[in-house]
Amino acid sequence: MPSATYWLFGEAILSEKQITCDHQGYYRELCPIILGHTYGRERALVFQFGGQSSQGLSPGGNWKFLELSQVEHAKMRDGRWYEGGRHSRPQACVEEVDLDMNIHERKRR
């Protein structure tokens, strides 16, 4: 059964809401883009636009993947939706995709 964090990230994708959370000891502000599993573990590909990061955050933000079991204090909030630039290669961090903002966007139009 999916965790509460997994459900929250899914709802954020569908409603285009931001997530704030702690992950690996860093406060993060992000928009989840892809949600699914790899080797049975819940994962998300996100675009982090604010907060902190172990390697610093680029001025325009960074793509990150999160192990959702390591996410704490996750909250959904209103705010601008950030998707970052195009990927230079296909994502490989989420093997079994359950929800993809890119597909959601195409279907809505």
Image: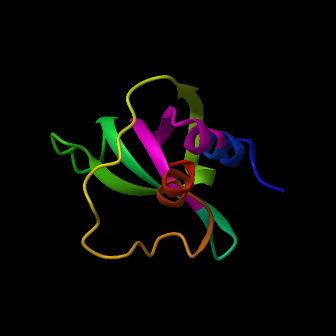
Q: Is residue 7 above or below residue 87?
A: above
All told, the count of numbered labels is 0
Using the rendered view, name the quadrant where residue 76 is placed.
top right
Q: Is residue 43 visible?
A: no
Prevalent SS, magenta region: strand
Residue at 56% in and 76% down: 95
58 falls in the magenta region = no
Q: Residue at x 35, y 40 (%)?
A: 82
Q: Position of residue 74 (x, y in %)?
A: 58, 33
**18 on left or right of 97:** left
Residue placed most toward the observer, 109 or 41: 109
Q: Seen in the image, is 78 located left or right of residue 49? A: right
Q: x%, y% of residue 32?
A: 49, 47
Q: Residue extending furthest left?
A: 59
- Extent of the magenta region: 11-35
Quarter location, residue 1 = bottom right
The one of 95 and 81 positioned closer to us in this rendering: 81
